[in-house]
Amino acid sequence: MGALGPANGTGVPSDHQLQALIAQAVPVDIGLTPMKGFKMDLSANPGFRKVFFSAKCDCGTNALLSVEVAQDKTLDEVKRVLTSLISKLQGQVKSFRSMPCDMHARLRLGPVAGR
Ligand SMILES: [Zn+2]
């Protein structure tokens, strides 16, 4: 008895909503592409959801960037930390872009088409 707040209706966004929310907040000019689908990295932080983005360099290297959001964060709570999530992504993009391309080549996964 005496519930002070709504016990149900947690307001926790679905994975899709979470990704859309963050994707919409990312400035277009930093050149991030939201990754379709979630890759759950179970070995990392349990209880956190990761939202992935890819950044592309002119040399053809793609970097996988991600931010973590606690699983039980509500939509409102995510909105409150959105700015810091975005600045984390921007920081990751910045360090990717400031890397020389021969380092990008080394980061590249998968077969490299040699010429
Ligand atoms: Zn490059």
Image: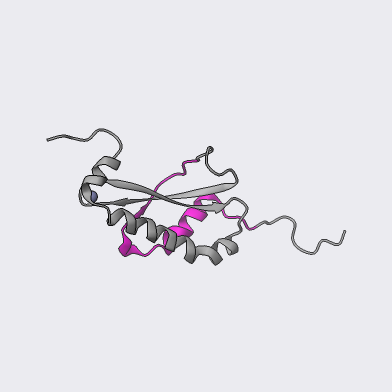
Please state the total of marks drawn on the protein image.
0
Can you give x and y, in whole percent of width and height, for residue 7 in the image? 75, 56
Furthest residue toward right: 1
Q: Residue at x 33, y 56 (%)?
A: 95
Can you give x and y, in whole percent of width and height, for residue 107 in the image? 30, 42
Can you give x and y, in whole percent of width and height, for residue 54 in the image? 35, 50
User: Relative to residue 44, is residue 83 depicted above or below?
Assistant: below
Which quadrant is the N terminus positioned in? bottom right
Q: Residue at x 40, y 62 (%)?
A: 26
Furthest residue toward left: 115
- In the rendered view, how is the structure colored? one colour
Residue 46 lies in quadrant: top right
Pick the residue in front: 50 or 107.
Answer: 107
Task: Give the residues in magenta.
Answer: 11-40
Can you give x and y, in whole percent of width and height, for residue 102 in the image? 21, 45
Asked if residue 23 lies in the magenta stretch, the reply is: yes
User: Relative to residue 81, is residue 59 depicted above or below?
Assistant: above
Asked if residue 109 lies in the magenta stretch, the reply is: no
Q: Residue at x 30, y 46 (%)?
A: 62
Left/right placement of residue 108 relative to residue 3 reads left
Pick the residue in front: 99 or 63.
Answer: 99
Left/right placement of residue 53 relative to residue 58 reads right
Left/right placement of residue 99 relative to residue 51 reads left
Which quadrant is the C terminus positioned in? top left
Q: Residue at x 46, y 41 (%)?
A: 39
